[in-house]
Amino acid sequence: MKRRQGGQFGARLAAWMLLAGGALAAGGCRSDMQVQPRYDPLAPSTFFDDGRSVRPEVPDTVARGHLPIDQHFYTGKVNGAPVETFPFPITRQVLDRGRDRYNIYCTPCHDYTGSGRGMIVQRGFPPPPSYHIERLRQAPVGHFFDVITNGYGAMYSYAARVPPADRWAIVAYVRALQMSQHATLEDVPPEERARLLKDTK
């Protein structure tokens, strides 16, 4: 009986030792994977002569798909002059995207109608000009794109926050806002015009 108990104890001890050894082995593997010879972002380095671990970009390097060779699309200008046209067709999807981006980035100053009475203006910030003044109604679309890209007056650049395609979508939506405040019956498509006239009778 005692011999049997001793055998069970030995088997249990061996099992526990095997389990403990496996746990240590697994922990050791994890440690090797967790502690790697690497640098944290912007950490100093004694390996490179300039003392930095981050390597500078090669001059004139351009990320794939980001070569700004299309002046119209990337600057809103051609030969230094603001363009009068959009670089791609303006669809309902583009306008919806422009409204979405405009409501995020532009309404704090320009408000939802483009009149320049946004929430921070109501709290004392200098008001931007209304989009509905004649000067801006006649301004080329390239002007708005350039302002979003480079800033103007108290407005800072949004180039780092809003990619070029979204800037154009915002400009398209600004044009829609301008039209919404100055549209006439002649601007309404004929089929819709007939329905509107019928509803007013």
Image (spheres, helix red, strand yellow):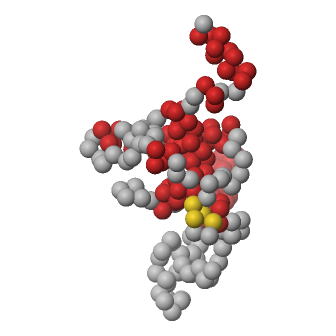
Image quadrant occupied by the C terminus: top right
Residue farthest toward the top in the current orientation of the protein: 201
Q: In the picture, residue 17 is in which quadrant?
A: bottom right
In the image: residue 81, left or right of residue 3: left
Relative to 175, say whether 87 is above or below.
below
In the rendered image, residue 32, in percent from the top left (x then y), is placed at 62, 70
Relative to 32, say whether 190 is above or below.
above
Residue farthest toward the left in the current orientation of the protein: 124
Q: In the picture, residue 200 is in which quadrant?
A: top right
Q: How many marks?
A: 0
Residue 143 seen from this side = yes
Rendered residue at 63%/16% (across/down): 196
Rendered residue at 53%/89% (across/down): 48
Residue farthest toward the bottom in the current orientation of the protein: 49
In the image: residue 94, left or right of residue 38: right
In the rendered image, residue 99, in percent from the top left (x then y), is placed at 56, 39
